[in-house]
Amino acid sequence: MKKIITILGLAAVVFAGQAVAAEKGFEKIFDGKTLKGWNGDPKFWSVQDGAITGKTTKDNATQGNTFIIWEGGKTGNFDLRIDYKIVGGNSGIQYRSFKADGPDEWRIGGYQADFEAGDTYSGICYGERFRGILSLRGKKTTLTVGDDGKLKKAVEEFSKDADIAKAIKKEDWNRYRIVARGFNLTHYINGVKTTQVVDRDKKNRRADGLLALQLHAGPPMTVQFKNIRIKKLK
């Protein structure tokens, strides 16, 4: 018995060491207690249960999509890891993004790692005020601009949409990962690759920009984010 316990203990130490090694170089950008370092409309954003929480109700609805913005600098090449939970509605993680026109300071456009309470959009790459849907689930999409000036999409399928959907939990915590290196952008949910964008649209693509979290206009919803950490890549 003693030998078995020793082996189990050693295995636990090895596993913990691997977990630490996997997170090496990451910076935690949410303290789990306050919104220090984040800027969002206090009518909608707070910290609840150790998570950044965005909430709308019938009596407290947002006019247009609103965001809480990380004030720690621009995101360029990075590996971002974040846990999310959504009940109702649609949300997303904005990266390499920009301030957009609107009635207040919390309007954002740019690349978005989308997710929702429904079955269609979680994992896609969406361009908020920025060219619309860029790449669907299970697809690697290369963006270019034709001679007519219109956006062109060359699409390769690497996985079935239904297979990816099986990895996503409803009204529960999921793990989102975004890796942006150069103009190659890849999304993962719960360790499963969901989409990839190769952006060769030289006029519109973005090398860096803001990081923000979305609260979508529409029916009442609640979205939460925790364990937010980022690693700068070369």
Image (cartoon, helix red, strand yellow):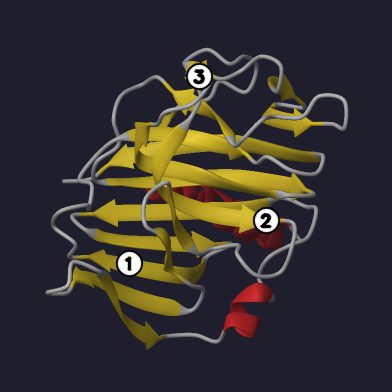
Residue 180: which numbered mark, if any? none
* Dot 3 alpha-carbon crowd within 10 angstroms: few under 14, some 14 to 19, many 20 or more: some
Res 229 quadrant in image:
top left
Q: Residue at x 35, y 55 (%)?
A: 179
Sooner in the amino-acid sequence: mark 2 or mark 3: 3
What amino acid is labelled 3 in the image?
A: Trp
The amino acid pointed to by label 2 is Glu
- Residue 221 shown left or right of residue 184 in the figure: right
Which kind of residue does numbered mark 1 sit on? Val
- Which of the two discs, 1 and 2, labels the residue nearer the N terminus? 2
> Above or below — where is 42 with respect to 107?
above
* Mark 2, secondary structure of its residue: strand
**Which quarter of the figure has residue 58?**
top right
Residue 34 rendering spot, x and y as whole percentages: 62, 14
89 to the left or right of 126: right
Q: Position of residue 55 (x, y in %)?
A: 76, 31
Cα separation between marks 1 and 3: 27 Å
Report the disc number at residue 38: 3
Left or right, 73 with respect to 34, comes to: left
Quarter that holds the N terminus: bottom right
Residue extending furthest right? Answer: 58
At mark 1, the secondary structure is strand
Give the residue number, with chain letter if any, for mark 2.
116
User: How far apart in space, not on screen, are marks 1 and 2 (Cα)?
Assistant: 20 Å
Q: Are marks 2 and 3 in contact (CB under 8 Å)?
A: no
Q: Quote the CA–CA distance across marks 2 and 3.
A: 22 Å
Q: Which residue is mark 1?
A: 197
Disc 1 crowd, CA 10 A, few/some/many (<14, 14-19, 20+): many
